[in-house]
């Protein structure tokens, strides 16, 4: 049987980077083996359950490109590539749980206790065969010695995590449970439940935790703990996927930059590392820079346009050729797509706003005749290409006996409103002669 794996997040309103990595490992294993990847939202805790909390998970997985293969067919397409499957929601599967609990009760494997239902836990040590950590022998704790049985349905009628997690894994024919090591302590209970249902438990692969770079436990509040922060700051998802794949897994040869195809090809459970992984934001930023630098133009444009739209800049108002040449002047100039609007937003704004401090420095009276002369010469430049523009700056500076920089600063501020930005000669060529002259005129009027 081909592997069937699942990512089973609880909607907490937060997708931890460790959860994203668990999702990725499951997805990679399914893609590597030609198996099935299931998304199951563990939303039995009705109090915490909101649509927004579910969306955080769905948007995160879509952003990473982790498409799921199965689920109820929904009207609103949710799977990124298959498009027609919603995830499974435990809240929609309550009858299954009831049926299974009744079966346990009728076989004497569970009993009522103070309005709740408890499962008769085995008193024997449980061996957890784990593909990552090896065999783990789990004895009853001192407290469990007194009463090893545990609640599977609360007195308010709500089924408990252990129960629903096992029932779904069983009914969805999950072959491999790949999840964080924090769940290892639950696994003896899960194996006992599988046995009670008369079904062989799946194979387990508990993946080591992700720690902060200093070795401390990563909490929700630690920088970089939330997947959403990467989406907002404008990382390239392919860089994040690449980085996450190496958190606790390592292909031979210690390679750091791997395409998704290669990762799918190489990924397997035996290479999951046994020690905890340390999260290195510097390395992720570096990798992100590498990805942007080597990114195909189309993909670069796509991510740029998306980032600009997020910042409220609508590139659709401009011809596509213009948009692309504008963006090309930015390639290799920023680390995060979130920086792009600040860096090159002027291309897509009708009014340039001047940085006040820079304006006070360069929009000064002695620069006015210089800029005027530059304008005169630019006005007759044909064609208006960056080489010619550069030569014009050089020639005017020479004529006036000043350094080229003396012209560059006010001209740049006139065109982009900021003291720094893409190469001035290139950006002038992109915005064209009319807009360049118009920008210089506006600046002159302020001097
Ligand atoms: N809902 C559990 C969690 O989010 C799932 C654990 C599992 O993968 O079995 O931690």
Image: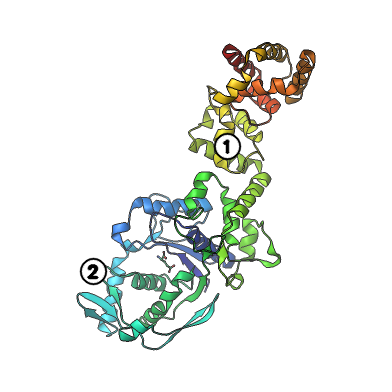
| Rendered view: 50 above or below 303 | below
The Cα atoms of the two marked residues, 1 and 2, are separated by: 52 Å
SS at mark 2 in the image: loop
Q: Is mark 2 within 8 Å of ligand 1?
A: no
Q: How is the image coloured?
A: rainbow
Let me know if residue 57 appears in the view: yes
Q: Label 2 near label 1: C-beta < 8 Å?
A: no
The foreground one among 157 and 371 is: 371
Q: In terms of image quarters, where does ligand 1 lie?
A: bottom left
x, y percent for residue 245: 58, 61
Residue position for label 1:
340
Let me know if residue 84 appears in the view: no
Q: Residues within 10 Å of mark 1 (few under 14, many from 20)?
A: many
The foreground one among 71 and 269 is: 269
Give residue 163's quadrant in the image: bottom left
Total marks placed: 2
Mark earlier in primary sequence (1, 2): 2
Query: Closer to the camera: disc 1 or disc 2?
Result: 1
Residue position for label 2:
157
Q: Residues within 10 Å of mark 2 (few under 14, many from 20)?
A: few
Residue extending farthest left: 115
Instruction: Report the residue at 49% width, 49% height from top.
Output: 229
x, y percent for residue 57: 43, 55
| Rendered view: 34 above or below 260 | below
Instruction: Report the residue at 62% width, 22% height from top.
Output: 361
SS at mark 1 in the image: helix
């Amino acid at each position: 049987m081909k592997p069937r794996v699942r990512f089973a997040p609880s909607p907490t309103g937060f997708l931890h980077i460790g959860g994203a990595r668990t999702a990725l490992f499951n997805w990679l294993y399914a893609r590597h083996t030609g198996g099935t990847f299931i998304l199951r939202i563990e939303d039995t805790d009705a109090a915490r359950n909101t649509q927004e909390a579910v969306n955080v998970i769905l948007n995160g997985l879509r952003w990473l490109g982790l498409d799921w293969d199965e689920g109820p067919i929904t009207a609103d397409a949710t799977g990124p590539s298959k498009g027609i499957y919603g995830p499974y929601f435990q809240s929609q599967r309550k009858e299954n749980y009831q049926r299974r609990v009744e079966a346990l009760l009728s076989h004497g494997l569970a009993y009522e206790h103070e309005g709740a239902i408890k499962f008769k836990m085995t008193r024997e040590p449980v061996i957890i065969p784990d593909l990552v950590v090896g065999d783990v022998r789990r004895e009853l704790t001192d407290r469990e010695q007194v009463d090893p049985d545990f609640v599977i349905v609360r007195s308010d009628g709500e089924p408990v995590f252990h129960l629903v997690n096992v029932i779904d894994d069983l009914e969805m024919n999950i072959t491999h449970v790949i999840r964080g090591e924090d769940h290892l302590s639950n696994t003896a209970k899960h194996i006992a439940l599988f046995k009670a249902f008369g079904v062989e438990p799946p194979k387990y692969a508990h993946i080591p935790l992700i720690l902060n770079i200093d070795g401390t436990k990563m909490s929700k509040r630690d920088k970089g703990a939330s997947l959403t922060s990467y989406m907002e700051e404008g990382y390239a998802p392919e860089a994040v996927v690449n980085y996450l794949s190496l958190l606790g897994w390592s292909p031979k040869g210690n390679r750091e930059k791997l395409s998704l195809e290669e990762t799918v090809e190489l990924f397997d459970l035996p290479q999951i590392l046994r020690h905890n992984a340390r999260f290195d934001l510097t390395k992720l930023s570096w990798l992100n820079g590498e990805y942007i630098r080597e990114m195909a133009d189309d993909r670069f444009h796509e991510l740029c346009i998306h980032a600009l739209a997020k910042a409220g800049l609508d590139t659709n108002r401009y011809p596509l050729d213009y948009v692309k040449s504008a963006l090309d002047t930015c390639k290799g100039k920023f680390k995060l797509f979130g920086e792009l609007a600040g860096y090159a937003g002027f291309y897509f704004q009708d009014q340039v706003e001047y940085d006040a401090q820079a304006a006070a420095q360069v929009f000064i009276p002695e620069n006015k005749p210089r800029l005027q002369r530059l304008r005169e010469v630019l006005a007759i430049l044909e064609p208006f290409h960056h080489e010619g523009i550069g030569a014009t700056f050089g020639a005017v500076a020479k004529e006036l006996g000043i350094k080229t920089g003396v012209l560059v600063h006010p001209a740049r501020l006139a065109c982009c409103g900021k003291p720094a930005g893409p190469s001035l000669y290139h950006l002038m060529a992109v915005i064209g002669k009319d807009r360049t002259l118009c920008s210089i005129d506006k600046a002159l009027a302020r001097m």
